[in-house]
Amino acid sequence: MALMTGEQYIESMRKMNLQVYMFGKKVENVVDDPILRPSLNSVRATYDYAQDPEYEDLMTVTLEDGRKINRFLNIHRSTTDLMNKVKMQRMLGQKTAACFQRCVGMDACNAEYSTTYEIDQKYGTKYHENFKKFLEYCRENDFTIDGAMTDPKGDRGLAPHAQADPDLYLHVVERREDGVVVCGAKAHQTGIINSQEVIVMPTIAMGPDDKDYAISFAVPTDTEGILMIIGRQSCDTRKTENTTLDVGNAEYGGVEALVIFDHVFVPNDRIFMNGENEFAGMLVERFAGYHRQSYGGCKVGVGDVLIGATALAAEYNGAAKASHVKDKLIEMMHLNETLYCCGIACSAEGAPTASGSYLINLLLANVCKQNVTRFPYEIARLAEDIAGGIFVTAPSEADLKGEVTGPWVEKYLKGIDGVSTEDRMKVMRLIENLCLGTAAVGYRTESMHGAGSPQAQRIMISRQGNLPMKKELAKKLAGIK
C-alpha cells in the first residue's frame, strides 16, 4: 500500500472498534467527538505533510527496495536519520502547536529492533524476526503505532512481583501453546486512541523474580480486553461550547489515556520479549533515550509557536519596543534553540548497535531531556510575563459577540490601533492554551515527566558521565601520580 492520505487515515480509524470511556461513559464515536477530534487532527497532520512535496524529505524515508514510508515507521540507519527525525519533529510542532503523538511509537520500534536482535543472539529466540514482520505489516498499511511503557507502579518501593496487587505492573497471567494472556495497565498513554497498533514494553529493569513482568509485545488497539479511559485536561470542555476563540487552538490537540489490559491474549508471533528479564533494562534505557531525544524536536517546535504568540501579544499591547520585552524574547529564543542543539547533538553523536540500527548518544539524550524539564517552564513564565494578566482574565467569545456585552469588550480590551480586539483575544487564548490549557499537558507537564522524570535522567547522566576518566584528566594535569 502507498502512503495514506490524511483522509484515508481518518477513515481507517473509523473502522476500529475501540473501547474508549470519558467522563464515566463509553464514547460511541471516537473520531468525531469534539473533545477528542483535535488530537486525531494532530496525527492526521503527520499523514498530510508526508504527501506535501515541501516536506517530503523530512516526513518520508525511501527504503533500500525503493519503497517510500513515513519517517515515523523508520528504523534509523545513520546519524542523518537521527537528525532528520528531530528536524521533522520540530516542523510538526510548529505546524500543530500540539502533541502529534507518533514519536512514542517510532521510539518504541527503534528500541525493539536492536534489543530483540541482542536477545536472539544470546538465546536463539525468534523475537527479532517477529518484530520485523510486525513492522513490515505496519509499513504496508501505513499504520500509527503507540508505545506503552509506563505502568501504574503502585508502591514505588516494591518490585513488580512484590506488589500487593500483582496487576499494578502488566504481567503474564497465563502461558498457552499459541501465546500468552496478560493483565495490567499502562498509564499516561499519549495518542493510543488514535493508533491502530500498540507496542507494550516493561517499564523498569527487572530481576529474576520478575520474569512474568518482563514481557513485550504488539497487538491491535481494538483487541478484546483493552479498555481506554481518557485523561482529564485543563479547559477540555471548552471544546464542546461551540467556540473557536476560547480554546486557543481549535484544530489541533493531544490526548492521554489510562489503558486497561484485562486478560488480553497475545499470539506467539507478536511477542518480542517473554521472561528475559536481564534485557528489560536495556529496552527501557534505549526507548527512554530515543524518546528523550524526541523532546529536542517536538517541544522546540511548540516553543517556536509560543514565542511567536508572545511577540504578537507584545506588539498588540503596544509594548514590543520596550527593551525588557525584547530581552525576554531573546531569552526565550536562546532557551528554545539550546533544546534544539541538544536534540541535534545527541543525534550527530549516535552510533550503530549490533543490529545495524543507530542509537543516539545516550548521555547527550539525557542531558537534552534534563534541559527540557526546565526550559519550557521558563519560556512559559516569560510568555505569561509579557502577555499580561489579560490572557487568563479576558471574557469569553460569547461576551465578545454579545448584544449587551460585545461593545464594552470591544471598547475596553482594545490594544493598539490597527489590530482588532478579537485578534488580540485570539493570541491571548493561544498563549493560555499552551501555558495553562489543554496544550499545557504536552508542553509543560510532559516536558517534566514524559520519557521519565527529571531524576531518571540524572541517574543516567551519573552512569554515563564517566567521572573516573575526568578525575584522571585532572590528576595528569595536576601532576598527581
Image (cartoon, rainbow, N blue to C red):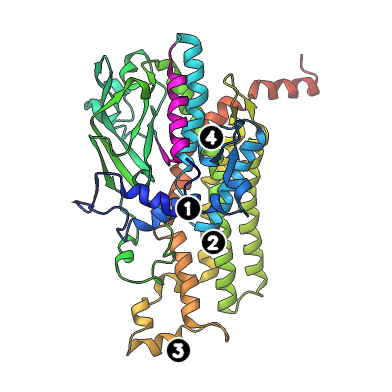
Whichever of labels 2 and 4 marks the residue nearer the N terminus, that label is: 4
Neighbours of disc 3 within 10 Å: few (<14), some (14-19), many (20+): few
Instruction: Report, in whole angstroms, how far the alpha carbon at label 2 lies from the one at label 3.
Output: 27 Å
Relative to 291, residue 445 above or below: below
Mark 1–mark 3 Cα distance, whole angstroms, equals: 33 Å
Q: Name the amino acid type tagged 2.
A: Leu
Left or right of 54? Residue 205 is left
The residue pinned by badge 3 equals 411
Amino acid type assigned to the residue bearing label 4 in the image: Tyr
Residue marked by disc 4: 290
Q: Amino acid at mark 3?
A: Lys
Magenta: main secondary structure equals: helix
The answer to whether the residue labelled 4 contacts the one labelled 1, judged by CB atoms less than 8 Å apart, is: no
Locate residue 451, reporting x and y percent.
Answer: 46, 38
Report, in whole angstroms, how far the alpha carbon at label 4 lies from the one at label 3.
51 Å
- Verify whether residue 353 appears in magenta: no
Q: Which residue is mark 1?
A: 443
